[in-house]
Amino acid sequence: MPKKKRNFALKMIVIVIVMELAFFAIRPLWINYHLGVKTEQLTEYLEQKYPEEEFSISYRTSRNYNPYHMEVRFENEQGWIYGYSVTDQGIKQVSVGVPNAELPDEGLHYEGLGD
């Protein structure tokens, strides 16, 4: 292989490797930043919709889950887990974890799953 082509190929390989490393180094920071913003948005939404109620917000950390789907547990409704999606289009309830044999619409904070 001519020297110029070999040098060009090596430069391209190094550029691709550096770009991949940068992607995998920056992506978690990017997601964590947006998680903070989305958690803040959901907190404001819940404080307006359910004033003076205690709740906790969590999210799953596995790669199989959308990091912008958050789980909310209300202090006055033990055992119930409400899933919220926080996107640029808005905030909506997307799932309900129901304890025992209760129906989702029996929950105090049931919002109709994005209706």
Image (cartoon, rainbow, N blue to C red):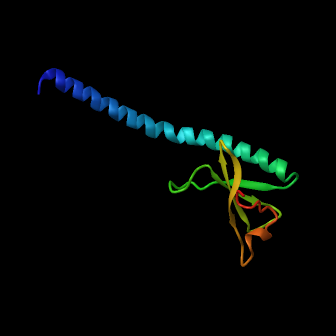
Residue 87 vs 74, above or below: the answer is above
The one of 7 and 101 positioned closer to us in this rendering: 101
Q: In this view of the protein, which residue sits in the foreground, 86 or 67? A: 86
Above or below, comparing residue 37 to residue 6 in the picture: below
Q: Residue at x 14, y 22 (%)?
A: 3
Where is residue 33? Give x, y as percent.
61, 38
Q: Quadrant of residue 78?
A: bottom right
Classify residue 11 as left or right of residue 62: left
Task: Residue at the far top: name it.
Answer: 4
Position of residue 40 relative to residue 110, above or below, is: above
Image x and y of residue 109, in percent = 79, 61
Residue farthest to the front, as pictured? 115
- Identify which residue, 44 or 22, lies in the foreground: 44
The residue located at (63%, 44%) in the rendering is 35
What x and y, as percent, mark residue 84? 68, 54
Residue 79, by quadrant, is bottom right
Q: In the rendered view of the protein, which quadrant contains the C terminus?
A: bottom right
x%, y% of residue 12?
28, 29
What's the residue at 67%, 40% (across, down)?
Answer: 37
